[in-house]
Image (cartoon, grey):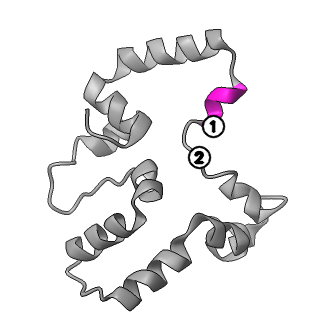
Amino acid sequence: MHYASYSEFGGLSNIHLFHYAWMKREPAEVVRQIAKILAVELDDAALEAVLEQSAFDHMKKHAEQFAPDADRGLYRNSADFFSVGANGQWAELLSDEDVQVYNERFAELLPEADRVWLSTGLAP
């Protein structure tokens, strides 16, 4: 499983996992954390510039710059890569039965702490 291949290295000082939900919920805190990890001084002006450039709406508006492989013509419209920027949006496309099957398989594959983090970005 993709997540497990990274999470097993989570205790290493040079591996850091950032959840999209946390990045959406507290973008300034995430940027500060990344700057700290990289030992980069970050004044208020630099923080604001990073937050502006990394905002979901800005990246979608400038998708040709930010979407992976946008220059290769993989998308009819590069902005489609960014969809709506919400966690769990996939669930509304599935039936209740499909979601139940997903949840059962998810529980078979990972312990609860990992499932909570993957689903919400929060520690259990």
The answer to the question of whether label 2 and label 1 lie on touching residues, with beta carbons closer than 8 A, is yes
Q: Which residues are magenta?
A: 89-93
Pinpoint residue 32: horizontal percent, then vertical percent.
29, 72
User: What is the secondary structure assignment of the residue under circle 2?
Assistant: loop
Residue 86's disc number: 2
Q: Quadrant of residue 39?
A: bottom left
Q: CA distance from mark 2 to mark 1?
A: 6 Å
Q: Is residue 77 left or right of residue 87?
A: right
Indicate the position of residue 115 as horizontal and vertical percent values: 36, 28
Query: At 79% across and 65% down in the image, what residue appears?
Result: 73
Residue at point 75% right, 64% down?
78
Is 91 included in the stretch rendered in magenta? yes
> In the image, is 27 to the left or to the right of 96?
left
Instruction: Find residue 40 and report its horizontal and vertical position in percent.
Output: 25, 84
Residue ID for mark 1:
89
Q: Which class describes the residues within 10 Å of circle 2: few (<14), some (14-19), or many (20+)?
A: few
Check if residue 2 falls in the magenta segment. no
Dot 1 amino acid type: Gln
Q: Name the chief secondary structure element in magenta.
A: helix
Q: Is residue 95 visible?
A: yes
User: Is label 1 in a helix, a strand or a loop?
Assistant: helix
